[in-house]
């Protein structure tokens, strides 16, 4: 049909355009450059030209270095030749001295002003209290007041001492309702001697009990120690009995051995 022919013609034209574009691309690129971009161009490289460019850049860098070194040498002093980017110090001794004197004068002025302000504010002993007024002081009046205070203090002391004597005994016992002790020196001496005698008697009795209980070498043993009850004859009997039992056991063992062996095997 007519429509079918038109579609085939349109398709043929599209294929022709594609073939022509492919031929143009092949003419621009080599067999290895098919996937490169459309406007790609081969790099034009000249070795001699590149070497000239490198030498030019190197010469510019050397020139900049020499200029910087010359500038450093012109700025540096005799001992700073090797220092980089040194700047000489601008120092004037007279100017520095004037600055120091000026600062010192300002400091002294501030101190004087502060001292004057303190004197205006404070009293004779340096009390820095706002609104301070000088004290009206009379030496004679102050002395009279001191004497009155001292007299009052002494009076109170005397009164307290009198009250203590009324309350206390001869040794100062401040006990309410205290009465003097009835004391007889001879009676007290007899009591003391009686106590000492009683104490010595108790000591002797305790020592006698200890000697009865302990042996001749155990006098210093602790209280409650009891001497060993030892009978020499009884001990001798026990030793003899023990020795007899041991001999009997040996004889029985020897009889058993003879029943097992012949007369020639006794020492085997």
Image (cartoon, helix red, strand yellow):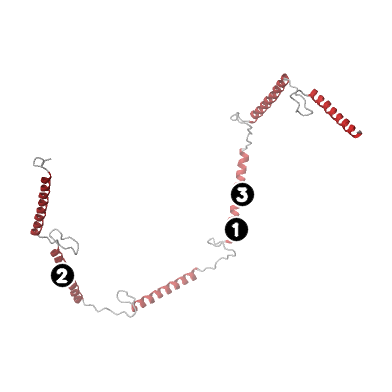
| Along the line of sight, the residue nearer the viewer: 57 or 17 | 17
Q: Position of residue 149 (x, y in %)?
A: 45, 72
Report the residue at 10% width, 49% height from top. 251
| Along the line of sight, the residue nearer the viewer: 254 or 127 | 254
Labelled disc at residue 117:
1
Q: Is residue 205 above or below residue 87?
A: below
Q: Quadrant of the C terminus?
A: top left
Q: Which residue is mark 3?
A: 106
Q: Earlier in the sequence, mark 1 or mark 2?
A: 1
Outermost right residue: 2
Secondary structure found at label 1:
helix
Q: Is residue 201 above or below residue 4?
A: below
Distance between the alpha carbons at the discs numbered 3 and 1:
17 Å
Please name which of the two marks, 1 or 2, marks the residue nearer to the observer.
Answer: 2
Q: Earlier in the sequence, mark 3 or mark 1?
A: 3
Q: Position of residue 68 (x, y in %)?
A: 66, 28
Q: Are marks 1 and 2 in contact (CB under 8 Å)?
A: no
Density class for disc 2 (Cα within 10 Å; few <14, some 14-19, many ≥20) is: few
Secondary structure found at label 3:
helix
């Amino acid at each position: 049909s007519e429509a079918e022919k038109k579609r085939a013609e349109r398709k043929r034209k599209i294929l022709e355009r594609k073939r022509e574009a492919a031929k143009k691309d092949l003419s621009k690129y080599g067999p290895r450059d098919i996937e490169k971009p459309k406007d790609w161009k081969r790099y034009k490289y000249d070795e001699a030209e590149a070497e000239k460019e490198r030498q030019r850049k190197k010469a510019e860098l050397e020139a900049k270095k020499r200029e910087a070194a010359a500038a450093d040498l012109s700025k540096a002093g005799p001992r700073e030749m090797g220092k980089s980017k040194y700047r000489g110090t601008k120092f004037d001794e007279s100017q520095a001295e004037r600055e120091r004197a000026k600062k010192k004068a300002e400091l002294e002025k501030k101190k004087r002003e502060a001292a004057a302000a303190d004197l205006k504010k404070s009293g004779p002993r340096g009390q820095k209290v706002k609104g301070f007024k000088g004290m009206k002081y009379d030496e004679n009046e102050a002395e009279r007041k001191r004497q009155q205070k001292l007299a009052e203090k002494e009076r109170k002391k005397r009164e307290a001492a009198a009250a203590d004597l009324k309350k206390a005994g001869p040794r100062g016992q401040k006990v309410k309702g205290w009465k003097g002790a009835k004391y007889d020196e001879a009676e007290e001496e007899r009591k003391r001697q009686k106590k000492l005698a009683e104490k010595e008697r108790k000591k002797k009795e305790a020592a006698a009990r200890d000697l009865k209980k302990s042996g001749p070498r155990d006098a210093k043993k602790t209280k409650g120690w009891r001497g060993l009850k030892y009978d020499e004859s009884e001990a001798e009997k026990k030793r003899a009995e023990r020795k007899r039992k041991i001999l009997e056991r040996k004889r029985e063992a020897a009889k058993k051995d003879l029943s097992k062996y012949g007369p020639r095997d006794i020492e085997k």
